Image (spheres, helix red, strand yellow):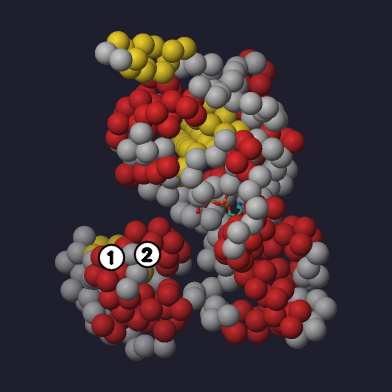
Amino acid sequence: MARKKHKDGGASGADGEGLLAPEGALMAAASAGQAERDVDRSLRPQSFGDYIGQRKVLDTVCVYVKAAKLRGQALDHVLLGGPPGLGKTSLAHVIAHELGARLFVAHGPAVEHRGVLASLLIQLGEGDVLFVDEIHRLPAAVEECLYPAMEDFRLEVAVGDVAQSIRLPRFTLIAATTRTGMLSAPLRDRFGIHERLDLYAAEDLAAIARRSARLLGIALSDEGALELGARARGTPRIVNRLLRRVRDLAAVEAVTQVDRAFADQALKWLGVDARGLDEMCRRILRTMIETYDGRPVGLETVAATIGEDAGTVEDVYEPYLVQQGLIGRTPRGRIALRLAYEHMGTPWRGQRDLF
Ligand SMILES: Nc1ncnc2c1ncn2[C@@H]1O[C@H](COP(=O)(O)OP(=O)(O)OP(=O)(O)O)[C@@H](O)[C@H]1O
Ligand SMILES: [Mg+2]
């Protein structure tokens, strides 16, 4: 099988599309969703220089990458945690690129059994990077098979009734998860490097919007970028999505430059309010304030009331609402805070039934 270097663009795969050998990245766009993901990929930072924000994480990772290169050895295994859309997959690509290593991509749930993992591992060469997305969804039997591979670079296989151990090259496993808490301790402990990505500051998101606008050929003023950055819920994927929607509106309205006023008008039209909350965020707050009368309420209950999956509410919406001080976590459940009442224009009647 012909294998390409990551920097040729041929050895990286898409995220979220199952198990991908390097060649698997070259798939035709099949739907609008696919086209969106393709744009997402084209905007993905390639190097440490392109990767905006997350200074602390980047500085740390940069040191480890340099040290590994100086030693001429594979980088230690890396675990990347944090909410969706914050740049875990992007960082895995950047690390592989900076190491000058080939990148193989697999999606946790697609590694259904040991055989799939084995076929992935035996493709790897010395110093290659294997990126496993959503590692918390790896089946337990596969996870166990990963332990000796990570620790001793050995693959245990059964040939008939005989157990055999195959030596693997020294590779780097980079794993991403939105649920670090769901990883088993033995798996977590086998990663030498643990990093957690946090929500981005508005200025960093503005810088990401400016970079994406440059790449997509969109005229975006600095103030327009700041407006998008401030209303993107701390998330690069959201700022890029808003930028594309605002670009569409600008095209329809024959607007040549997206400035602050146009960005504001377009975001309102898209249902994104001044704090960056969309309709789903507001439904969550309304449910807590009105349906449950401001009392502590379980996340599952909120999710069921608005007809959304509890995991999605927890991963996608809650981090920003908590970070903004709109909702709080109490021993008895989630609670809407005073700021949420002010934001939703509901009179505040004091905190209710906290303990
Ligand atoms: N630090 C960054 N600098 C510039 N662009 C970024 C950065 N982080 C993310 N992006 C952009 O945001 C998009 C989403 O990032 P990415 O796919 O890496 O997130 P993720 O954490 O892997 O999300 P998920 O948990 O859903 O897999 C990328 O396509 C990229 O364009
Ligand atoms: Mg990802």
Evaluate if marks 2 and 1 touch, with contact meaning CB atoms under 8 Å apart: yes
Q: Quadrant of the N terminus?
A: top right
- In the depicted view, which residue is nearer to us: 273 or 84? 84
Res. 285 image quadrant: bottom left
Say which residue label 1 marks.
Answer: 299
Res. 301 image quadrant: bottom left
Measured as percent of width and height from the top left, residue 67 is found at 62, 22
Measured as percent of width and height from the top left, residue 19 is found at 50, 40
From what the image shows, is residue 251 above or below residue 116?
below
Please give the name of the residue rendered at 58% of the width and 47% of the height, measured from the top-left corner. Answer: 14
Q: CA distance from mark 2 to mark 1?
A: 8 Å
Res. 268 image quadrant: bottom right
Residue 55 seen in this snapshot: no
Marking on residue 313? 2
In the picture, measured across the screen, residue 94 lies left or right of residue 151, that is right
Q: Quadrant of the C terminus?
A: bottom left
